[in-house]
Amino acid sequence: MSEHHEVLFSRQTPLNLALPKDVEQPIHTCVGAQWDCSDIQCPGTCSIEGGSFMTTFDERTYRFHGDCEYLLVGSSKMPRHGTIEAIFEQCGTTYTKTRLVSVIYATYEMKIVFSMDGKIEVNNQRKNLPFRTGNIKIYRCSSNYIQMNTNFGLDILFKVTEVFQVYITVGVMFYGSTSGLCGNFNGDSTDDFKSSMEITEGSPVYFVNSWRVTAHCGVAHDEDSDPCSLSQVNEMFAEVHCSALLKESSIFGQCHNYLDPIEFYKNCRFETCNYEQTNDFMCASLASYVSACAKRGVLLIGWRNSIEQCRISCPHNQTFSYDSRACNRTCLSLSDPNFECSAGDAPVDGCNCPEHTYLDDTGKCVSAAECPCFLAHVVIAHANEKINLYGGICVCENGNLKCTGQDPQEQCYPPKVYFNCENAQDGEYGAACAQTCQMLAAEGQCISVCGLCGNANGNIKDELITQSQHSAFTLMSFVNSWKEDPMCDDVTEVVYPCAKNPYRKSWAEKRCKIIHSALFQPCRNLLQWLPYYNNCIRDSCGCELVGDCDCLCDAVAAFAKACLDAGVCIDWRTPDFCRKF
């Protein structure tokens, strides 16, 4: 008889790390030298990085360029008809130069606006941090990040330096209930482009335009050709700095076994070349990879020191850290240690006060004895100051009020009564992970698909399943696992044909433009055409001189076939272009 051993680990997490405590641990059973794995439902994160690079809750990625206000997340799980909206604005002369400038959390009775300069307004009134209203608390994690936490399963992290970025995390209770640019969070990335009219669009542009909140703004656009091709200086600058992500010998190489850097490299090149604020977008792109690594337990300490343009100087006597936290670093934490601490907060970088010092209300790091005291998160007394409060005498000592009589934290002026939301019963908005199983059904029979083409289950998160049935962290380890001949050498690096054969790039871009020409316009309304265009350029650069047009024609033919499958027949071949003999 074979032995069965059960172990706990996550496909998304290195084996030496544990999943968050509020996430059910998946069970993986070893049976006959094969893993028998159960899948689980975990919280989802939607992000906007760079100018307008989106990742949905189900991890589908796309880029768009729009100058408008859009619905990011709508859900019946948000109380008081809550929504999250985003405002993008033009920041240059070309339509590709748009960026996120503010994010709005709104209910029928409240509107919180988070701006790119780090300012926060609640119902048109400027608020200082930390701040609490109802079941929402907002605080600064570090000089670079602001965190919004709720008790109903919604957390939002804002990056407010270099480039304004946002990371929206929802608990499993939101599963299948969301809509907007962040997708529907149902575990199937193939139907993320569901419009406001409940139509699954093939192109991100039509999907994005359907979620405009204001009708007077213009339509969004797809990403166009490589912006690096417009400036040789920008291209060289981008390549020098962004290529560090791919080098095993660089500090970023420490994370390659846990997170493939290829897509981050592509985004870095685009952002760096596309925007006039070259340094900011370059550093923000690199920081996105570092942040994603930190969530996987890999802290790339010192990466900013290796790139001069990305170094950060801290104000006053604050210190920089790659694992910066507000916990026990502010004067408020002395009287309310739980307010700025959350077990689910991801590691972030930035400036905070050194250990055993605390940030006061003026932005300086002081000793506990110098800290002011807070009531309802507002300073009411300075260090060693005596005040009259609710008929008693209170003294501010080490950030805490020492009072005679009843605790002032638990008093309110009549007719109001005191209630502490932190004492609410558990389970009101609880998070639980329910086991799920995804299978592909064909004619009533359950079949499994594997290999370099993926597993065809609609879930992009588990596409890189190796031959030994575990999830690969990098594209190369996935590819190498499917070698038919074990004597073949492993692929050790990704070669970009246009970088290897730069003399082919302009020719490839010119010829591949047929994909986004008027000829294919009826099809582009139905399909996400940009990947086909990028693949065409890449493949055309790879066919050096022998069979000069074979790769080009095959790439265009692949798009034409996808169009035909979508119900549109395009007569694209001519005697002068990919003629059929």
Image (cartoon, rainbow, N blue to C red):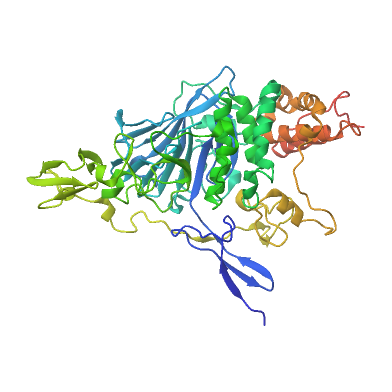
Residue 123 in view of the camera: no
The percent position of residue 13, horizontal first and vertical second, equals 57, 56
The percent position of residue 454, horizontal first and vertical second, equals 70, 52
Viewer-side residue, 116 vs 306: 306
Whether 84 is drawn above or below 405: the answer is above
Count all numbered tags in the image, as a single digit: 0
Whether 76 is drawn above or below 102: the answer is below
Residue 255 in view of the camera: yes
The reply, left or right, for residue 391 in relation to residue 383 is: left
Dividing the picture into quadrants, the one containing residue 357 is top left
In the picture, the quarter occupied by the C terminus is: top right
The percent position of residue 82, horizontal first and vertical second, equals 37, 40
Residue at the extreme top: 93
The reply, left or right, for residue 393 in relation to residue 158 is: left
In the picture, the quarter occupied by the N terminus is: bottom right
Query: At 30% from the left edge and 39% from the top edge, which residue is drawn?
Result: 360
Viewer-side residue, 217 vs 59: 59
Residue at the extreme left: 391
The reply, left or right, for residue 408 in relation to residue 483 is: left
Viewer-side residue, 376 vs 188: 376
The percent position of residue 83, horizontal first and vertical second, equals 40, 38
Viewer-side residue, 431 vs 71: 431
Query: At 35% from the left edge and 41% from the top edge, which residue is drawn?
Result: 138
Query: At 56% from the left edge and 38% from the top edge, which residue is drawn?
Result: 305
